[in-house]
Image: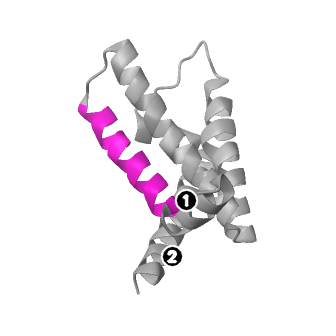
Amino acid sequence: MISEILQYASMIAALFSLGLALLGLFSPARAMKLVGLVPHPNAPYAVSEVRATYGGVFFGVTAFALASGEPIAYLALASCWLCAMLARIGSMIADNIWVRHNWVSIMVEGGIGLAIAGPHIGVAQRLAGL
């Protein structure tokens, strides 16, 4: 029963990741607004950055996990979310940015990453020889 719940949570989190990736790909202005970025007239390429990173990278990793169903692909996707969380924490410390947005983002990124990884932890342990 617990393993089924973890599987569903992982799938829901991966679908959430796919939804955010599609938002970045097809509605970069809305994705920018969601994360608090504002387009700058001297940097019109910022929209391309959002499409490429928020959209393309996350779409590729998420779509591969969903299409293949391979635990290692889900762990790769989870590591993207968890590394984003760690990078945000590093930014909060290095850049002294202790705002609510970052705290909420840490919880979301960590929650998504852990939910995706949950049912696949055993694979990681076997690969590591634990």
Which secondary structure, mark 1?
Answer: helix
State how many labels appear.
2
The part of the image, by quadrant, that contains residue 120 is bottom right
Residue 33 showing in the rendered view: no
Q: Quadrant of the N terminus?
A: bottom left
Dot placed on the residue nearer the N-terminal end, 1 or 2: 2
Is 4 situated above or below 48? below
Residue ID for mark 2:
7
The part of the image, by quadrant, that contains residue 62 is bottom right
Residue sitting at 62 percent across and 17 percent down? Answer: 43
| Mark 1–mark 2 distance (CA, rounded to whole Å) | 18 Å
Q: Which residues are magenta?
A: 100-117
Q: Amino acid at mark 1?
A: Gly
Residue ID for mark 1:
19
Left or right of residue 101: residue 78: right
In the rendering, at what x and y percent does residue 13 appear?
Answer: 48, 63
